[in-house]
Amino acid sequence: MNILITHANIYTVNPAQPRASAIAIANNRILAVGSDQDIEAIRLPHAAHVNLNGGFVLPGFIDAHMHLLFTGLSMQRVDVFEVKSIYEAVERVHTRAAQTPPGQWILGNGWAQTSWGSDEFPTAAELDEATRDHPVALSAKSGHAMWLNSLALQRADITAGVPDPEAGQIVRDASGQPTGTLLENAMSLVSPVIPLPTPQQAEDATVEAMHAMNRRGLTGVHCMDGEGGIESFRTYQRLRQEDRLTLRIVKQLPVSALDAAIRAGIRSGLGDNWLRIGGIKVFADGALGPRTAAMIEPYEGEPMNRGISTTEREELFETVLTSNTNGLATFIHAIGDRANHDVLDAFELSRRQAPPGAPPLRNRIEHAQIVHPSDIRRFAELDVIASMQPIHATQDMHMADAHWGRRSATAYCFRSLRDTGARLAFGSDSPVESFDPLVGIHAAVTRQRTDGTPGPEGWYPEQRLDIVDAIHAYTYGAAYAGGMEREVGSLLAGKLADLVVLSKDLTTIPPGELLSAQVERVMLNGNWLEP
């Protein structure tokens, strides 16, 4: 389909031509970008003329870190996000239990004990108040803890005699009995007994999530599916074969698949413009919520707790070196300052040992939530991409202050990383947080929650970004991080025609108005998507 778009207010994210008013599209690619006069002079057969009446146009947003299939499944499960008390969470499970045949699993996600004003983890006894006839498993908002009821513990055969797995913890009472919360790798103890979605259920959930994301202006995502990554990859491949993808997907493979990927000769970039391999996903530590992020110094008020290194330093070095040597970039989850330091060391070692002439790989740290001041400059020096989620800063700020204290000055340090030359790629970590890019941009620019908390200046305001930097991180920066900057991420001739039309010019309105902007239209691959 040929389209001539005119009378638009276009921010191209192309420094050579940052502004324009019109675009010519031939089939699925941009033919030209320029003035109304320039574009109207182009003669394209059977071209549709679209007058946007001043609508603000950006490249399609790309979420550089999310869990696509899990987001779709979460839409169908018990939602305990943002509940204000444990009693409300239990009541929501009770409501679902009344609609569910006895014996069937009830799954949900989103709880955070800090939202209830407590640092204590919830217990099976409390969840038993909702139902004793259904096994229940609720994932924490962070994805690094799971809350089970007694029947679920029984189904998984988790008893006092079961030892903690490596890099995991079964939370226990004073007598050694499991209380009902599993941390980090301990969650693997229950995974085998939780039924997987059928292929059709997985496809339906993914399609539902994609359409919801399209409505928020997203045209691409980078999927970080952890140990479930192979099954979700199969789902995405089936949807690709059926021509049902409405997002461009850069998919990470779990580290457990590394040897198989090497034997098959898979390298970063394998695939097409709809579905491609990004690299290998590795976990270096836990998360802030359950206080398992690996820290150099102990957590505030917990002198014996420095978090959990889910991959030990030496193993981390070996994994990065093996992956990079075989042409696979590594995408490493690192929250705490110790984890970030160790990952940067691993990347530095890999660079030193790379054979002469080896093509550079786009290694990334996922989250980089708190970085020691001496490590900030190393992102740029080692050309490590900081794949971050601005909304984590505003949603986690109270936990960060409580558990990291003054160290939070270098938590979610967008500005410091940008000023030292680091490449930023922004995402949401959905379903952990909202996948709406405007919410993420607002958080990056204001360091405030959507309700204005903590005040006009925001949380550690010296780390606020300019709006153009935030837009760049959600467009070109994310495209670069996925190895797709030649195809998407900015609006210029030759690139794929992915764009979003907004009701307001994000570059000129006050930051406080960012959340009032509406997505009016979305184009993917040269076609307008249905609202």
Image: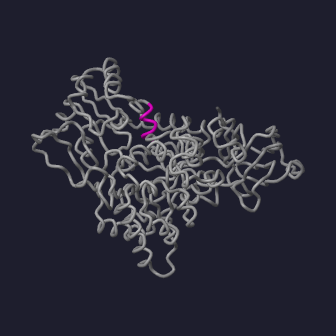
Residue 309 appears in the rendering? yes
Nearer the observer, 515 or 347: 515
Residue shown at 43%/50% (left/top)?
224
| x and y, in percent, of residue 255 in the image | 35, 58
Q: Residue furthest bottom?
A: 356
Residue shown at 33%/58% (left/top)?
295
On whether residue 70 falls in the magenta region, the answer is yes
The answer to whether 519 is drawn above or below residue 371 in the figure is above
Residue range of the region highlighted in magenta in the rendering: 69-75
Residue shown at 43%/60% (left/top)?
371
| x and y, in percent, of residue 301 in the image | 28, 50
The answer to whether 248 is drawn above or below residue 329 in the figure is above
Q: In which quarter of the image is the C terminus?
A: top right
Q: Quadrant of the N terminus?
A: top right
| x and y, in percent, of residue 415 in the image | 56, 58
Residue 244 appears in the rendering? no
On whether residue 44 falls in the magenta region, the answer is no
The answer to whether 246 is drawn above or below residue 315 in the figure is above
| x and y, in percent, of residue 369 in the image | 43, 54
Q: Residue furthest top?
A: 98
Which image quadrant is residue 289 in? top left
The total number of labels drawn is: 0
